[in-house]
Image (cartoon, grey):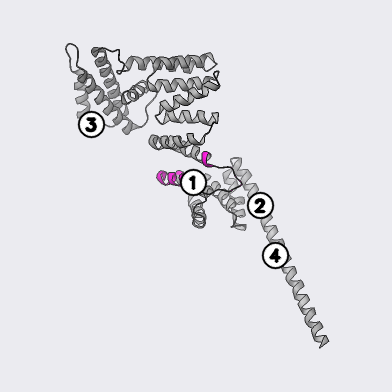
Amino acid sequence: MGRKWGLMITIAATMGALWGIDVFLARTERAEVSGEARRDYEAGSARLAAGHATDAVDPLRKAHTQDRSNRQYTLRLVAALVETGKLDEAGRLLADLLEHNPNDGETSLAEARLLVREGEWENALAYYHRAIYGSWDSKAASPQTTVRLELVNVLVQRGLQKDLLAEVLLLETEAAKDPQLLRRIAQLYLIAGSPARAETIYRALLHDDMDDPGLYSGLGDAELALGNYRVAEAAFQNAIRNGAERNRLEQRIQLAGSVAELDPTLRRLTSMEKFDRAVRILQLALDALKQCGRGYSAEQIAGVEKLLAARVRGNPANELAEQRLSTAEQIWQERIDACGASTSVEEPLRLVMAKIAQ
């Protein structure tokens, strides 16, 4: 009996030793695989960061294959695939990640970027919002502001002013007192067609830094958009005095003068002066539409030309000027709808149209 127990103990000890060896070997193998995956990930990440996305794909794909549970490996591979145009493969990887964690902010951001590349703008905006309000690694700083800045850049590229203004308003609440971010927000307000908000920010920033030429230049642009031409000229002059590029700002000063001579909303104008300016604006709007080459039909253009050629005796009534301004606004909107943003040559007309619309 003692020999039997001894044999059983020996067998058990041997099995335990073998199990321990198996566990050790498995752990060693996992550690080796994990280390190799890490090395491939770091090599691929370095190549991607250096702008060599094509060379980054293979090592990142190897890292992902060796450790599919590592979300960071998958996301970095997705970034390389998107950069190299392999959008289908990137989409499949992201779909799998989102299926397992639909509220992950970093994955939602990657999906938004993929959708931008694919031209799926509305879906991209939705995923940007999911990224902003999603969950992020607790060790990382809050990415809300960074992601929203990326979103507003997409909106700027697409010319989506209404959506842009809504995001910039939220961005301002997140900016706290960061002067660099506030400068960018002021610029974005100008792009979004809200110069009054831009003016407020520029003046607040100038209160703390009265020698910054960039702030004076931005203030001048805001005042120009508001129709405060003399104030705009003064701001541009202050920018020049503080070291800003003279050539560009002298052009802005000339632009302010040109728009002031065109603006039909000034109170000091006589009825004849307002009428004459309305006719000039209508002619400029029609010229812009013709240059665009799309929009009104030949019959509609002929009707506008007939209105331009109409003779008015004596002091024209205010209604006649307003009729021409209303027609000019319709034509200008048609020009924008047909051919997109205005050109630099059309800048005086764009500014005066914005002033009329206020």
Q: Do the residues labelled 2 and 1 touch (CB within 8 Å)?
A: no
The numbered mark, 3 or 2, whose residue comes first in the sequence reads 2
Label 3 and label 4: CA atoms lie apart by 77 Å
- Per the image, the residue denoted by label 2 is 38
Which dot marks residue 297? 3
Q: In which quarter of the image is the C terminus?
A: top left
Amino acid tagged 2: Arg
Q: Earlier in the sequence, mark 3 or mark 1?
A: 1
Q: In this view, does 217 lie above or below 48?
A: above
Q: Is residue 302 one of those drawn in magenta?
A: no
Measured from the top left, where is residue 63 in percent x and y?
62, 54
Label 2 sits on a secondary structure element that is helix
Q: Is mark 1 on a helix, strand or loop?
A: helix
Q: Name the residue under label 4.
A: 26
Residue 95 in the image, given as x and y percentages of width and height = 48, 55
- Residue at image position (45%, 20%) is 220
Which mark sits nearer the N-terminus, 3 or 4? 4
Marks 2/4: CA–CA distance:
18 Å
Q: Position of residue 30 (x, y in %)?
A: 68, 60
Residue 68 occupies which quadrant of the picture?
Answer: bottom right
